[in-house]
């Protein structure tokens, strides 16, 4: 690889603050219109700011250029394949953006009287009903702002459920391979994490689960799981797990990160889960936005329902010739309370509801089928040739919507770490899979293609992996120093943490 | 409907062949039979794009949005004008569709935006460290409480009743989980009762939590109130409206350890309450306890300037149960909207906007106070929102005013039983003098009508501005 700088690399990164020049501006504001008074007459001088914050001074054309140029320094789903495991990078329909931007949605104040927000509340109610059917659980709260927020909600619900029965339980079980948010949420909810071992199929190790339950008898509040599990395999013991947890008096929590595998095929509620969070930014097509926004509604069973967050969107039956109406119910004496301001990330609800309307029940089931087909096909392609040898599948059987490869032989035989392969993939125009997760697989690569990718994209990805492994046989350094073509090359992340520079210094 | 998938029947056959199965159903056989749904989902079948659009237009039309009713409702979210370039930039695929920047080499755009955003928020709040964004305002208050517990090893929060009720409720919800006690301090003439606050803070207090302007719109003397926190070694947490930081003394200059708030007023639409973002700034001493993503500056192997996610060892994907917080979103797209809005306003425009709000708010307050049946709820200084008392049932007055095309404000009785007659009125740069005049007239007329007072035709004519009817 020739080390000539690309034009983008040659362009030095400059922040908008560094492009500022005193006296320039973009905004034209309305006239004040009302009789002006000296500011200090309206607000005491000691409460006023002495100097305006040093925001950039720059005219509109240059603001547009600045952010357009910055945007080109991002890789995005609309530009290429993004097989990031556990993240469900499926297509983001632009129709959803259009309907979310309708003034009746975008300019609706959250404090508006529910009688004057009937369309919005009905949409929320319909989304609740749809998610309830998809999850197989009767009650839905849309309030949590993200998956992690849904987890915290689920644990607080669990606490309230036990407290209401006069019990105080202190421990939450989670697989040692769970998403990092699970144990972090457990701590925030005031519980202690007890790790449960994972079997070689990525499922719960049943012997260990029994042992942990026996050891902590009467103490276990909850078990948090994903299913399909982190190896992309459906845990066939799930019914037994559920009955063990329920016998022990705990709740069973479903991390919905992997729901895209089973929509219309299997439902967490039918598996025995009490509480489920759904990532609307994964299975239900809300764009990820480079790190948010999303939403993490929760669906719960009857026994958890009394503790659901408030307010809750409800439908009041129509009578006397009037149709049904929709309202916010605050009168929930056992509720855990609010998790955030107002009613939740409504803009996300609009997009996800539009997505559900577009696909319908049949389309959702077909989306999951195609996601599973794509994952298994890509797995099969990667089992061929060099990849099959150097990057074996962590657990060799049919997967659901994603699968995990181990880069251990690649590292041992070619000296290439999973990180090197990931960085080299950038030069081929692919976003790499999730790396080093789950923790139980050495040098893990977690691949989730989603249903919206073509066979051609999957083939091209498999070919790129093959090519990288081939070149590494003769020149392993090529991957070890990759990437070469990206706007910047490998970055010093240690420095950024040891001596953090987290804002621009201005003079 | 399969319009977002591409697999043709031939593709499927080839793919199934490569996998070595005869049907997709075989792949689902790993789900134990009793757990398979075995029936279609009880949801309507998919419909065409045009039909989805029409359906949602129909639903949106049943909402009284700010284009239908002139919006004087605030209470934490405001009907500001979002400049067109915000939409143009945030709708670019390159910002809209990536995931969190875990691969920094191909995420420099998003990471640099985070770095710029952090710089801007640090400037606004007068605190040196900012994260890249949290979910939204009220849950950011709860996150500040969690940080304060870790920093002080104490479990007691003293919170002003002037803090947004949703923030206080959210803090209370979270506190049940992490085992903290929440003590509330009341208001006196619209402002936090300073004596009661000083009395409530003790050596067990992890944080004193204030909001300025507070929920009633009153600008608090944060510095004076914060002395109690300093005296007892508690952290001073200040929730603030970012727009008002254009004119108000920044929390960092008032002794705040943490300044945070709801970011919606910056470049984000109302969206019936979300998505927006929360901002969260702190002193250097708290940098390793911060919640959420933080972008940091670094270099690549060739010495080029670049940006990465810094201090990731605080975070859940590394630290798991020892993480400083469970959050893993930065509301990056919403924070981008804020950054573009702030750049568009610029240093001068931001200041001018703040002054415009203060002037129009003062005018509106005076104008309403002069109306028969409307009194000020407090006389404390205000910046962009103020509270009045109506001499008639608030909800009924609001209904009457809505018929004239105005959403007059937020009824305080929803969360403050002591202010059952209270109405919170918010001003933005979109609320013109003519609209304020009409609000005053409409509120006066509605209060009068509700009181059953007879308003003669001649009086009516003298108070209705020309063309307002």
Image (spheres, coloured by chain):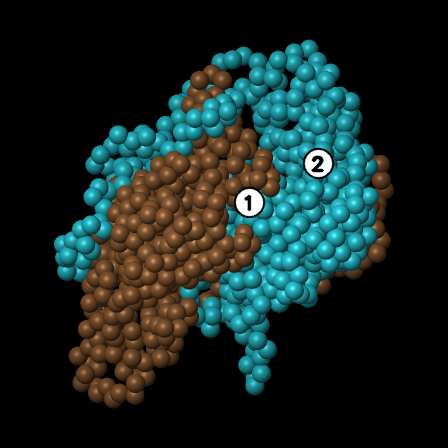
- Disc 1 and disc 2 on one polypeptide chain: no
Residue drawn at the location 56% of the way across and 62% of the way down = A336
- Quarter of the image with the C terminus of chain A in it: top left
Residue at 29% x, 37% y: name it. A56
Judge whether A22 appears above or below A476 on screen.
below
Count residues near mark 2 (Cα–Cα under 10 Å), then give few for <14, some for 14-19, many for 20+: some
The tint of chain A in the picture is cyan
Question: Is residue B99 shown left or right of residue B276?
Answer: right
Q: Compare residues A423 and B188 and report the one nearer the observer.
A: B188
Q: Label 1, label 2: how many angstroms apart (C-alpha)?
A: 37 Å
Q: The brown chain is which one?
A: B
Residue at horizontal 82 percent and vertical 37 percent from the top:
A397
SS for tag 1?
loop
Q: What element carries label 2?
A: helix
Check the image and name the residue furthest to the top.
Answer: A474
Label annotation for residue B326:
1
Where is mark 2, residue-wise?
A455
**In the picture provided, is B445 more to the left or to the right than A361?**
left
For discs 1 and 2, the disc positioned in front in the rendered view:
1
Check residue A287 in the rendering and tell me which mark sits there, or answer none: none
Q: Is A486 in front, or is A190?
A: A190
Query: Is A300 left or right of A313, judged from the image as shown?
Result: right
């Amino acid at each position: 690889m020739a080390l000539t700088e690309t034009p983008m690399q040659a362009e030095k990164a400059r922040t908008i603050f560094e492009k500022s020049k005193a006296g320039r501006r973009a905004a034209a504001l309305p006239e004040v219109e009302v009789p002006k008074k000296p500011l200090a007459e309206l607000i005491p001088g000691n409460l006023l700011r002495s100097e305006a914050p040093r925001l950039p001074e720059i005219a509109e054309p240059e603001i547009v250029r600045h952010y357009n140029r910055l945007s080109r320094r991002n890789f995005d789903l609309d530009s290429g394949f993004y097989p990031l495991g556990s993240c469900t990078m499926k297509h983001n329909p632009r129709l959803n953006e259009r309907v979310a931007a309708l003034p009746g949605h975008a300019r609706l104040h959250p404090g508006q009287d529910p009688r004057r927000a009937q369309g919005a509340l009905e949409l929320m109610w319909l989304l609740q009903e749809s998610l309830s059917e998809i999850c197989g659980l009767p009650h839905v709260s849309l309030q949590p702002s993200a998956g992690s927020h849904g987890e915290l909600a689920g644990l607080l619900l669990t606490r309230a459920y036990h407290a209401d029965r006069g019990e105080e339980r202190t421990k939450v079980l989670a697989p040692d391979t769970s998403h990092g948010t699970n144990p972090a949420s457990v701590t925030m909810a005031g519980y202690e994490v007890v790790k449960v071992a994972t079997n070689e199929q990525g499922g719960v190790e049943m012997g260990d689960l029994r042992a942990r339950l026996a050891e902590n008898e009467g103490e276990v509040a909850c078990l948090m799981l994903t299913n399909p599990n982190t190896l992309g395999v459906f845990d066939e013991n799930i019914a037994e797990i559920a009955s063990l947890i329920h016998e022990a008096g705990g709740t069973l929590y479903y991390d919905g990160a992997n729901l895209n595998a089973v929509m219309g095929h299997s439902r967490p509620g039918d598996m025995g889960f009490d509480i489920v969070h759904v990532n609307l930014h994964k299975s239900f097509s809300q764009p990820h936005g480079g790190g948010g926004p999303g939403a993490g509604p929760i669906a719960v069973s009857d026994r958890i329902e009394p503790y659901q967050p408030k307010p809750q969107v409800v439908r009041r039956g129509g009578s006397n010739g009037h149709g049904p109406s929709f309202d916010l119910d605050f009168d929930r004496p056992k509720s855990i309370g609010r998790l955030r301001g107002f009613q939740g990330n409504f803009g996300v609800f609009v997009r996800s509801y539009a997505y559900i309307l577009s696909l319908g029940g049949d389309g959702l089931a077909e989306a999951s089928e195609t996601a599973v087909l794509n994952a298994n096909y890509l797995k099969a392609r990667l089992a061929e040739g060099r990849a099959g040898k150097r990057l074996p599948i962590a657990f060799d059987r049919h997967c659901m919507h994603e699968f995990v490869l181990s880069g251990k032989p690649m590292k041992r035989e070619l000296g290439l770490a999973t990180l090197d392969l990931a960085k080299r993939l950038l030069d081929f125009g692919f976003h790499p899979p999730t790396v080093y997760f789950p923790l139980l697989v050495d040098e893990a690569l977690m691949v989730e293609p989603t249903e919206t990718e073509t066979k051609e994209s999957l083939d091209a990805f498999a070919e790129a992996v093959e090519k990288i492994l081939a070149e590494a046989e003769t020149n392993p350094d090529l991957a070890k120093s990759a990437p070469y073509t990206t706007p910047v090359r490998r970055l010093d992340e240690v420095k950024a943490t040891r001596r953090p520079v987290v804002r621009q210094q201005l003079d | 409907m399969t319009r977002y998938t591409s697999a043709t029947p031939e593709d499927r056959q080839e793919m199934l062949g490569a996998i070595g199965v005869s049907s997709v159903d075989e792949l689902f056989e790993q789900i134990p039979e009793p757990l398979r749904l075995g029936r279609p989902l009880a949801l309507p079948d998919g419909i065409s794009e045009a039909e989805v659009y029409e359906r949602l237009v129909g639903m949106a039309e049943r909402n009284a949005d700010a284009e239908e009713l002139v919006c004087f409702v605030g209470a934490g979210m405001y009907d500001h004008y979002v400049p067109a370039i915000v939409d143009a930039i945030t709708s670019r695929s390159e910002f809209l569709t990536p995931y969190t920047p875990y691969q920094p080499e191909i995420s420099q755009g998003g990471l640099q935006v985070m770095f710029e955003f952090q710089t801007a928020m640090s400037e606004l709040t007068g605190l040196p460290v900012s994260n890249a964004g949290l979910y939204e305002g009220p849950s950011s208050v709860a996150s500040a409480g969690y940080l304060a517990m870790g920093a002080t090893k104490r479990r007691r929060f003293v919170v002003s009743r002037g803090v947004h009720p949703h923030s206080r409720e959210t803090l209370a919800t979270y506190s049940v989980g992490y085992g903290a006690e929440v003590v509330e301090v009341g208001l006196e003439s619209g402002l936090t009762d300073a004596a009661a606050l000083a009395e409530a803070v003790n050596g067990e207090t992890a944080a004193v939590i204030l909001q300025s302007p507070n929920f009633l719109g009153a600008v608090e003397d944060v510095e004076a109130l914060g002395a109690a926190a300093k005296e007892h070694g508690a952290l001073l947490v200040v929730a603030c409206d970012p727009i008002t930081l254009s004119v108000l003394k920044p929390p960092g200059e008032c002794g705040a350890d943490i300044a945070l708030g709801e970011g919606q007023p910056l470049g984000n639409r109302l969206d019936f309450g979300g998505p927006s973002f929360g901002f969260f700034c702190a002193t250097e001493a708290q940098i390793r306890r911060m919640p959420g993503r933080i972008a940091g500056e670094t270099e690549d192997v060739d010495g080029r300037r670049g940006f990465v996610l810094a201090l990731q060892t605080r975070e859940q994907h590394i630290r798991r149960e020892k993480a400083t917080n469970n959050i893993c979103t930065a509301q990056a797209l919403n924070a981008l909207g804020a950054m573009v809005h702030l750049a568009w306003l610029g240093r001068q425009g931001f200041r001018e906007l703040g002054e415009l709000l203060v002037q129009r708010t003062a005018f509106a307050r005076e104008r309403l106070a002069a109306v028969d049946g409307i009194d000020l709820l407090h006389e404390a200084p205000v910046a962009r929102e103020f509270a009045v008392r109506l001499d008639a049932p608030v909800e009924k007055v609001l209904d009457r005013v809505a018929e004239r095309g105005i959403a007059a404000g937020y009824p305080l009785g929803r969360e403050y039983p002591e202010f059952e007659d209270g109405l919170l009125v918010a001003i933005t740069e979109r609320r013109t003098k003519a609209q304020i005049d009409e609000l005053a007239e409409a509120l006066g007329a509605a209060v009068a009508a509700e009181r059953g007072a007879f308003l003669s035709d001649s009086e009516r004519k003298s108070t209705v501005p020309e063309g307002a009817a």
